[in-house]
Amino acid sequence: MGEQERILSVRDLRVQFSQKKRGGLGRAIPVRVVNGISFDVYRGETLGLVGESGCGKTTLGRAIIRLGSPSVSGSIAYNGREITSLGNRSFRAIRREMQMIFQDPFGSLNPRLTTGQMLGEVLSVHGIARGKASRKRIDELLALVGLSRDYCNRYPHEFSGGQRQRLGIARALAVNPKFIICDEPVSALDVSIQSQIINLLKDLQSGLGLTYLFIAHDLSVVEHISRRVAVMYLGKIVELADGSELYANPKHPYTKALLSAIPNPEPGVKKERILLNGDQPGPLNIPTGCSFHPRCPFAMPECSRSEPVLKEPAGSAGHFVSCLLYEE
Ligand code: SF4
């Protein structure tokens, strides 16, 4: 892993927002949604990032490409260059290489622009193509995502959910990105359409040499696209490993519970479901010690006092876990 080229290196990233208490009265209080996260993404791979809604995974993705205005500390290096300290002007050129595909493409598409107008605007604003060259590039982009050129004159509301996601992907590709954050791109789609979009993303990755950070709330969704998978809980990564290793040999109790919830595809073979106590608490009520301890079926008395750190247990090269069960 060490010899591969890192496209993104995140170190001790913390992201926090100010939030007023219910009713909007009183002073705003800081809410830390991402709480000291470190990971690398290697060129040409897909890193899957999985966790329940509210665990901070989307906030993490948005912080990397500076969407929204949270307070961010720690380091984000893109192609070896620290980007957290860059001014907006210097960041703009890098931002073009880093695009995002959203869960709800409809919300991110202008309903008043046809497909051709929308893609033409992106190409023009970024100085990529105008006039005839723009029309040629729009045809190419539509072909890349499996849409006919006849769709050029249609508005977003005339597309199905799957077609709209293809359009969202075409828009991200318009600026020739190198790194794409896919934020739950198939969560709102029917299962049959989900696999079509995942296959499209895989084909685009091998054809265009793209790198993905693929965010999902379900381990089964990322299984077929990710080379490595990171599991997040309450603002932290609790386990990170090669996909095949993580699915065959999960270590963290939370990962085990998520995997046990995936139905077995073999008929008649029953899996033992690991049930968790209660719901994931909010970022204002992070439990002491291991933040997972109130829900963990394997919790020990020290779990409420000591905070585990993400590390490779002996004999588990490349498989990181944050759990006191694996600490010496
Ligand atoms: Fe469970 Fe304790 Fe491990 Fe946390 S540290 S996951 S509570 S066993």
Image (cartoon, grey):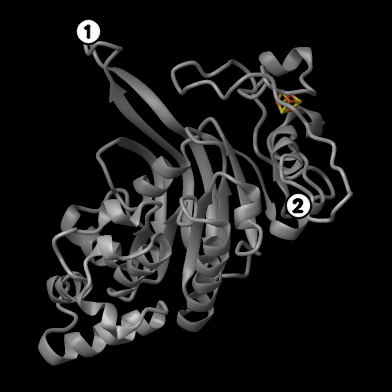
Residue at mark 1: 26
Find residue 179 and name its label.
none
Residue 185 is situated, as x and y percent measured from the top left of the image, at 45, 56
User: Residue reaching furthest left?
Assistant: 131
Residue at mark 2: 247
Above or below residue 164? Residue 55 is: above
| Residue 79 seen by the camera | no
Q: Residue at x 73, y 50 (%)?
A: 319
Q: Quadrant of ligand 1?
A: top right
Badge 2 local density, few (<14 within 10 Å), some, or many (20+)? some
| 81 with respect to 234 (left or right) | left
Q: Nearer the viewer, residue 161 or 273?
A: 161
Q: Residue at x 48, y 77 (%)?
A: 204
Residue 321 is situated, as x and y percent measured from the top left of the image, at 70, 40
Distance between mark 1 and mark 2 Cα atoms? 46 Å
Q: Residue at x 49, y 63 (%)?
A: 212
Tell me whether the residue at label 1 lies in contact with that at label 2, contact meaning CB atoms closer than 8 angstroms: no
SS at circle 1 = loop
